[in-house]
Image (spheres, rainbow, N blue to C red):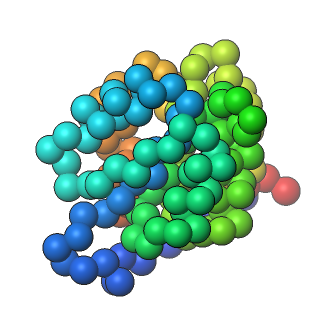
Amino acid sequence: MNILAAPPNHDNNPANQPLQILCVDDEVNILKALKRVFRGEPYRLLLATTGAQGLAILESTENIGLILSDQRMPDMSGSAFLTAAKALAPQIPRIILTGFTDKSSAQAAVREGVAFRVLLKPWDDPELLEAVRNGLNGNFQYEETA
């Protein structure tokens, strides 16, 4: 069953505040690479190196427009993190970044409606930017199987 996503509600975002993207990855170099990809884009990145840090940021920060998470992290998988993030803020679109070896577990998260998209590392910058824009604009749907 496909579930259409409602566009994220950005009404409480002051016009002068950029939308925020929460990026969670245990590899600092990946977070740095994401910063480079989004340089010049109208987004503010919030960076976390653990799922627990990501959840703390999510609980304490308003105006998060999208979540990007690595799948394979110590202590908490990306799927587990995004499941918890979905419980806290179901309206925020979620994307998983993963290496080829984790592709099947990441695809399971999409089938379960935990993420709307899986992107493989190394990602293609234009593809990543398009996926983020689609998420922020509500141009996606979650897929859930019963």
Res 122 seen here = yes
Residue 26 in the image: x percent, y percent? 56, 31
Residue 143 in the image: x percent, y percent? 66, 53
Residue 68 in the image: x percent, y percent? 49, 45
In this view, which residue lies farthest toward the top? 101
Q: In this view, does 72 lie above or below 145?
A: above
Name the quadrant containing residue 4. Answer: bottom right
Left/right of residue 1 with respect to residue 63 in the rendered view: right
Who's the residue at 52% across and 59% down the image? 57
Name the quadrant containing residue 118. Answer: top right
Left/right of residue 75 with respect to residue 58 in the rendered view: right
Left/right of residue 7 with respect to residue 54 in the rendered view: left
In this view, which residue lies farthest toward the bottom? 12
Res 5 seen here = no
Who's the residue at 41% across and 23% down the image? 29
Q: Is residue 124 above or below residue 44?
A: above
Residue 64 in the image: x percent, y percent? 43, 64
Left/right of residue 23 with respect to residue 94 in the rendered view: left
Q: Which of 31 and 111 is in front in this view?
A: 31
Q: Is residue 27 above or below residue 40?
A: above
Q: Which of 85 and 108 is in front in this view?
A: 85
Who's the residue at 43% across and 45% down the image? 47
Who's the residue at 66% across and 62% down the image? 86
